[in-house]
Every structure is written in C-alpha cells, then in structure tokens.
Amino acid sequence: MNYDKILKIHMVAICGTAMAPLAVMLKRLGHHVTGSDTSVYPPMSTVLEEQGIPVREGFDSENLNPKPDLVIIGNAVSRGNPEAEAVLSDKIRYMSQSAALREFFLWDKRVIVVAGTHGKTTTTSLLAWLLDCAGLDPSFMIGGVPIGWESGARLGRGKHFIIEGDEYDSAFFDKRAKFLNYLPDIAVINNIEFDHADIYDSLDQIVLAFRRLINLIPSNGLLIAPSDDETVSSLLPDAQSPLETFGAATEGDWRAGSITVSPDGTSFDVFKRSELLGRLCFSSFGRHNVSNGLAAIAAASSVGLSWAQIEQGFRSFPGVKRRMEIRGVVNDVTIYDDFAHHPTAVRATIDSLREAYPSRTVWAVFEPRTATTIRRIFQTAYEEAFDGADHIILAPVFNPGKAPADDRFSLEELSSGLVRRGKDTRIMPGVDAIVSYLTDHARPGDQILFMSNGGFGGIHEKTLESLKSTSGPL
C-alpha cells in the first residue's frame, strides 16, 4: 500500500485511548478518517469531535460503505464484530493500531517508547512536554490528554516521536504486545506487575513481552529502567544497548532526595550519580510521580536537554486529564478524577492525596471496570490499597459477566475486608445513589477522589452539579 497518497481510512473502536490519538494524527496527514464505537465518552469523544472526525455509534457493516482503502481495527474488537467480519469477507486491507502507527509515522523518526504497568501516561506526557518546551517540536502519541493540549497526539517537525507503549495485545489477529511494533531507539520501563488478566495468564507471560521489547533496542539506543524493581532488574542483563537506571536506591544513575508533597504539588532534589543537579517542583501529586519524573528526566537528558530546560519544563507542566485531575471545587469540596484501577495505582493515588492534605477528609469512590479488576486476581490486594482513605464507596462492578463466574470480583468480600481494617465502607447501587450520598455527607474541605478507567456514568459532573444545587450541610 502506498502510504504517501490520501487514503480513506475507517477505524473500528475509534474511541480507544490509543485509537483516538492515531485518528487525529492520520487526519493531520490529510487522510479521510471515519470511525465507529459503542463506548463513546470524554475525553476521547470530545477530542474526535473537536477534530471533525465523524464517529458512528455502534458497529455495522454499512459503516464500511463506501469501501475504505484501509480499516484499522482496535484491540477491543473480536471476531463476530460485524465490521471485522465484513473486512475479512470482502478482503478489505486492515491492520492493528500499533502496526498503523509504525507504518505511517515511525520509520523516519527517533522513537522513544515509554512502557510499564504504571505511570506510562504521566511519564510520556511529561517527556513530550519537556521536549516541546525545549523547542524540539516532537511528535507524540499518548493514551490520555495532557492538560493544555487539544489531544494526546501531535505531529511535530522534530526528529523525535514519543509513544506510550502498551503491553496489551495488538488485535484479535495479532496477539503480540502493542509496543513490539514501535521500533524503539530509547525505551523507558517504569515497572512491571501483573495486569491484563484477560490476555495474560501469569506475570511470566508479561515479563516475556518486556524481554522482547528490550531485545528490539539497537546497540546505539538506550534502555532506561528503575533500579528498585526486582522484576525489571531481572531483565537488564539481557540488554544489548546502553542502560541508565533511576530510583531512590543509591546505586541508581538518576536519584531523588528530600521529597515533599503538598497541595501545591511535589518537590524533590535530583542527583545524577553523586552530583546534585538541583531541586524540581511540579504540580503532580505523589511520590510515585517522582519516579515518573526521574524516568522523564533521564530520557530528556539523553536527547540533549540541559538542566535549565528540564527545570523550566517541570515548572510549567500542567498534568494530564484523568490523572488526579481536579474537575471542580464547590463550597471547598474538591472533586478529582483519576484513572487508577490496579491496586498499586489505587494505593499510590490515595496516599498522594492523603500526604498532600493530611488533615482533610478523603473520600475514595471506586468503580471496578478493567478486565483485571472484575476478576479475583487482586481481591485481597485491594483491601490494603484503600488504607489512606477516610470513607470508601464501592460502585457496581462494570460488566461483571465478562469475567468467568468462578473468577468474578466480589464487592461484598472487599467491603467486609475493609471494614475489618476499620475503614468506613459502603457499597452503592449506582451513580445516582453515590451522588446523593456524597451531596448529603460531604463537608467543606473534603477531598473526593473518583477512580475508574471509564466514564463512570458522568459521576464527576453530576456530583459537582448536585453540590451546587443543594443548600444542605455545605
């Protein structure tokens, strides 16, 4: 296929966190892009609408009429989808999102892939921000929307392309991890834990995917990895490229010290080996974001940014939508939206809010939604994850039928475990009940944290509107 000519491209499951940015980038190359999906909600739906990319609700073979030149099929799509079936029956050219990104954009770029179980979006966004502030005009593709940018994708004029590298599989016809398509010159691995229980049976399978990623880095490239993650460390001897490490450990090439978390954000000293470079401050909460920051610093330094450029970029970084994003404040009640779903991320997010506001009441409102969280794999681990919260509200499990009946996550078991730990916990039947309860019980100064990897039924805006309209205890 000639990728230089203008193509008619249709994208199946276009609202995915990787698909929507790709759609934006393809349109900016001049291609005619359309899409379809059944889960259309912000921020991705908003991004597509603002870019003038038409999205059809629902999947139908008629969405491929007239016949497109190419169909890009998201990894949420399986056999039986009417558009996927039409593609196969009519022999319409098709590929995965990750393969499309490679073929259309990556061969002529110096590619930086940011991977790991946690922190990918924040690290990728921060790194793109640093290079942009330094005038390098990078291209990037992020599975989220950095605050202050209109989308998580951009085609720059510079030589660098920064990609959030997901270990999830590429498509129903390509079960390899997506990041194996991304031609990494520099790879950042933040951490490795078990996740994606719908496609991986064990941590060993996930480790194998990362081992293959490391094996793709050329000898003139660079691997950036944590010094304090045992699983990642076990892979480092296999690297054929130079290596730089980061973390709190004294042997790390990049280290942080004197970390402080406050309502203004997070501050920390930065050391390169034994040399103190200076102190950085940025608006993101939490010690986990210090690790993300060190990874971004190492990558930015490797492409030539000076300490002054890095410092300036950190100071102006506004954060990322749905990563501890403040959605609004009503009568001194603050509403946050966060993507946390894995117990490690849930704990880190709550703890960061608790450290920033040690004397405030923290509400944690959690919706189990991912293919992993609706299973029992982390049933017990979640009990400790909520320790930093004062009040915990558990929303119904989203689409529980997608998990096998004998492996289905139990809200009742989690609630009982939390109560045994002395936590005020309740299970609510849905969004309206949660909004009503919060409206009646929240007090000035309270911090309400909503955690879900989906739209959560618009609960953030509904809560804000309810708090505005009531003259109750507030």
Image (spheres, grey):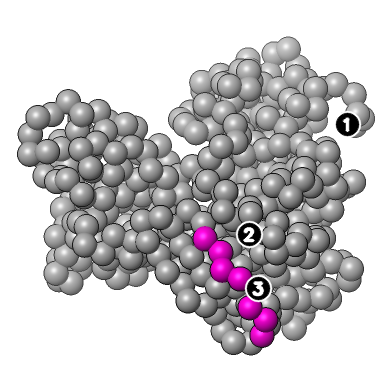
Percent position (x, y) of residue 151? 61, 34
Q: Position of residue 321 (x, y in %)?
A: 49, 42
**What residue lies at 17% left-to-right and 42% top-to-bottom?**
438
Q: Which residue is mark 3?
A: 277
Q: Residue at x 70, y 64 (%)?
A: 307
Numbered range of the magenta stretch: 274-281
Q: Residue furthest left?
A: 473
Q: Say which amino acid is labelled 1.
A: Tyr
Q: Which residue is mark 1?
A: 3
Residue at image position (15%, 37%) is 439
Disc 2 target residue: 311
Q: Check if mark 1's residue and mark 3's residue have beta carbons within 8 Å.
A: no
Residue 279 included in the magenta stretch of the image: yes
The secondary structure type at the circle numbered 2 is helix
User: Which residue is located at x 51 percent, y 23 percent?
Assistant: 58
Give the Cα distance between marks 1 and 2: 39 Å
> Nearest the camera: 6 or 252?
252
